[in-house]
Amino acid sequence: AYFRSTISTIERRYGLNSFSSGTISSLHEVSNCILIVFVSYFGSRVHRPRVIGVGGLLMAVSAMLLTLPHFLSQPYTHDSALQKFHDLCIPHNTTTSPESCGREDTRRLADTTLVWILMAIAQLLFGVGSVPIQPFGISYIDDFAGSKNSPLYIAILFAVSVFGPSLGYLLGSVMLRFYVDVNRSVVTGLSPVDPGWVGAWWMGLLIISGFLTLSSIPYFFFPRQMSSEVNMSETETDSDDNLREKDRSLLEFLKLFPRMFFHLMSNPLFLLLVLAQCCFSSVIAGLASFLSKFLERQYGAPVAYSTLLVGSLNLPAAAVGMLIGGFIMKRTGLTAKNIPRFSVIMLTISTLFCIPLFFMGCDTQKISGVNYPVEPQGGLCVSSNQTSCKPTTVLNIKGQRQTLRLAASLEDQCTKVFTNCKCVSGADGQVKPGHCPNSCSHYLLPVILLISLASLIACLTHNPLYMMLILGIQEYKPFECCPPKLTLPPSLLAWLPAPALFGTAIDMSCIWWKNVCGRKFSCEYYDNTLFRSRYLGLQVGYKIIGIFLLIILGWKAKRTQEYDLEKKPEI
């Protein structure tokens, strides 16, 4: 979650497009999908808490690897009009051809390639470490908890698992207030509210690596088995089944797995439920990967502030929804017939709350040289007399709590003002370098509140649907150790492709690419209307498909025998 909270900063730092950053953020699902198959086989044969501890240590190592690009790359340099275009009255080319590629551009491309390699390795290792945590953790709880308490315990597990990412986003909001090269004593004229600001994304990973190490140690002292809340007859039956499973070799299991997997997927009810879950997981993946960037680009929120809003409002709302959903399961005893109905109602309400978001935004500002034509005889700003467009310098004394330091050059303490510019109305036609102020900032808090409310309502259905999935596979003993079917389809169909798909939709909204050595480097400006409609449209589209699948599921459930979720099916 912390890594996703800094993904827009990493984009800006290394010139990645949204497709690339979305792909990197989901690469851990590749190793997760491959190794989850073996979790079922080794689940009843290994010491589950200790395997979880080893997984935590591997994730700590992967967090350290994610920081390497910062230490192996050159210091960050921000290309702005103030730094690069000393005279805006002269046309400037914003691209560089392969033939004119200089040392600076070559270095940037090399840093981008290095980021891809190191972060891909780190993410794949993270996937290996994260494989046993949820399956072994859920099965450990389910094995030693009574059937009435298991839904509540799992609901608490999921709720706490959301508060963890919330802390990750809050940590991101703190770390991104520090400049990326804070360890190199680099002097910069940027501030955290500047759109070109790049925060210290790597510092939080070092902190998280330490906490992962500390939190992994206690797992090595948990017992292999705990005193169970279920009756003795159930325990004896389970132990006999486990003994029979241990007699099966790994080769036999691998041969059996595809047959059992496709046999379960041939069940229409289960297949509809899994596909619906994949749709809702895709929405979560899109929000987790790009919600901060959406708030930055649409409403002008600083990077640290947008991350703070996601961590303090959106994720806690989702956690509260999951927890309330667990209590609803325990108090009402929802049945297989009622869960789809309940879920359709809640998800429809959640989708309706998303509709106003399409209209809460502003059109793209007209920017000279980007989406506004530049006169052929001049540059970004044309003087009325073609000769007097000379910049004057105005000393800029910075605010109350900051100490004024003497920089190497007086220019670092000054702001340039361009006068007599024909493209600007007003006295003297004055303009200053920098980004135009955002006129939609007043929508920021209403938007994040609406998104959080929609998330809370949608997450009410998380635990009922999840318990329905668990009951659907209990008759398949080879997968009892928290079955890969609960994680494999969502990983393959949602968590792996969804961030890249959302990233592609965002990239298609770009109206001005920064090119380096003839290659698209990063997007500088987006069409706000296209960005908003495509990003939100994908989410609503996924939700509508999921609701449609649940309606079919509820209709088919009427024709099957109804069962109580607190009773385990007889085998």
Image (cartoon, helix red, strand yellow):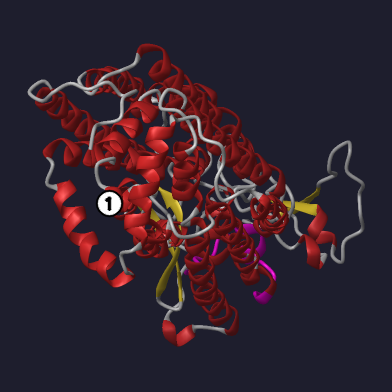
Q: Which residue is mark 1?
A: 493
Where residue 17 sits: x, y (%)? 43, 60
Relative to 190, residue 305 above or below: above
The residue located at (79%, 53%) in the rendering is 414
Q: In the image, is residue 79 part of the stretch drawn in magenta? A: yes
Relative to 362, is 282 on the left or the right? left
Q: Nearer the viewer, residue 123 or 426?
A: 123
Relative to 201, is 409 on the left or the right? right
Relative to 99, residue 362 above or below: above
Q: Nearer the viewer, residue 43 or 33?
A: 43
Relative to 127, is 258 on the left or the right? left
> Circle 1: is it few (<14), some (14-19), or many (20+) Cα within 10 Å?
some
- In the rendered image, which quarter is residue 28 located in? bottom left
**Main structural element of the magenta stretch: helix, strand or loop?**
loop
Relative to 250, residue 470 above or below: above
> What is the magenta range?
72-93
Where residue 436 sits: x, y (%)? 55, 42
Q: Which amino acid lies under the numbered mark 1 shown in the image of this protein? A: Leu
Q: Nearer the viewer, residue 90 or 177?
A: 177
The residue located at (85%, 60%) in the rendering is 410
